[in-house]
Amino acid sequence: MLVRLSKLSSFKVKKVIWCFCVDIDATKASLIVPVNRNTINRFYRLFRTLIYYHQLQEFKRTIKGEAECDEAYFGGKRRRGVPGKRGRGTNKQPVFGIFERNGRVYTEIVTNCRKPTLQKIIRGKISPKAIIHTDKWRGYDGLVDVGYDKHFRINHSEEFSDGSGNHINGIENFWSFTKRRLAKFNGVKVNFEYHLKESEWRYAKTKDQLFKELVVLLKESSRKTVS
């Protein structure tokens, strides 16, 4: 399967996959393999496309356990004199995230973080039977009124955890991980949504796990192409 992806040997293809999984950029990977940088970029685009659609499929079912919800802001610069918490009130790109405790992360690029926007996503991805943890942002007001009677909120101006398991540390750790990743590549201005889904896929996994999962995705894609 791996050989059929290109004219490269199976050994070199596996090295390209490994470079991707350990988060080496295309320029450095082209020196390690060694392969032309354009070829590496072609492989990386294929990997990211497969991962993107795989992650979309991952959240077809709703969360029924515990979930943490939060917003983050990427790129852009804060406008002087405009107040805003963690990017609110700036021209940064807002992203909404859901962390399923002991499970997956789901992210979605949004136009704003107002109540109607966030509630629509929450109602589509989280079961009313689930336990939801958020901060005090007004975008989460009224969740109890629409059936989420297990909605717990943490006031970050006073504490990060109340000692009873009420916190959003999981999703905040994911935001930190993602921003550190993107900073290594000097931010991502093109295909941001693909890099966001890639970060979902990478989060809290070992390099070996990533390698094995990506090989499986490539095999599945190859079988579909043949059939």
Image (cartoon, helix red, strand yellow):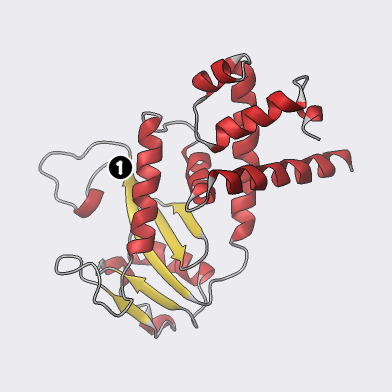
Residue at screen point 60% across, 54% down: 56
Q: Foreground: 14 or 56? A: 14
Q: Which residue is mark 1?
A: 92
- Position in image of residue 207 (x %, y %): 55, 43
- The quadrant in which the C terminus is found is top right
Q: Describe residue 193's horizontal placement relative to residue 218 as left or right.
A: left
- The answer to whether residue 30 is above or below residue 65 is above
The disc labelled 1 sits on which kind of residue? Lys
- Position in image of residue 45 (x %, y %): 61, 31
Residue at screen point 56% across, 33% down: 20
- The answer to whether residue 65 is above or below residue 1 is below
Residue at screen point 41% across, 52% down: 110
Q: Foreground: 179 or 94? A: 179
- The answer to whether residue 183 is above or below residue 31 is below
- Position in image of residue 181 (x %, y %): 40, 39
Label 1 CA crowd tier, 10 Å (few <14, some 14–19, many 20+): some
SS at mark 1 in the image:
loop
- The answer to whether residue 189 is above or below residue 82 is above
Residue at screen point 55% across, 22% down: 29
Q: Is residue 49 visible?
A: yes
Splitting the image into 4 quarters, where does residue 144 fall?
Answer: bottom left
- Position in image of residue 213 (x %, y %): 65, 48
- The quadrant in which the N terminus is found is top right
Splitting the image into 4 quarters, where does residue 160 fall?
Answer: bottom left
Splitting the image into 4 quarters, where does residue 137 fall?
Answer: bottom left
Q: Describe residue 92's horizontal placement relative to residue 110 as left or right.
A: left
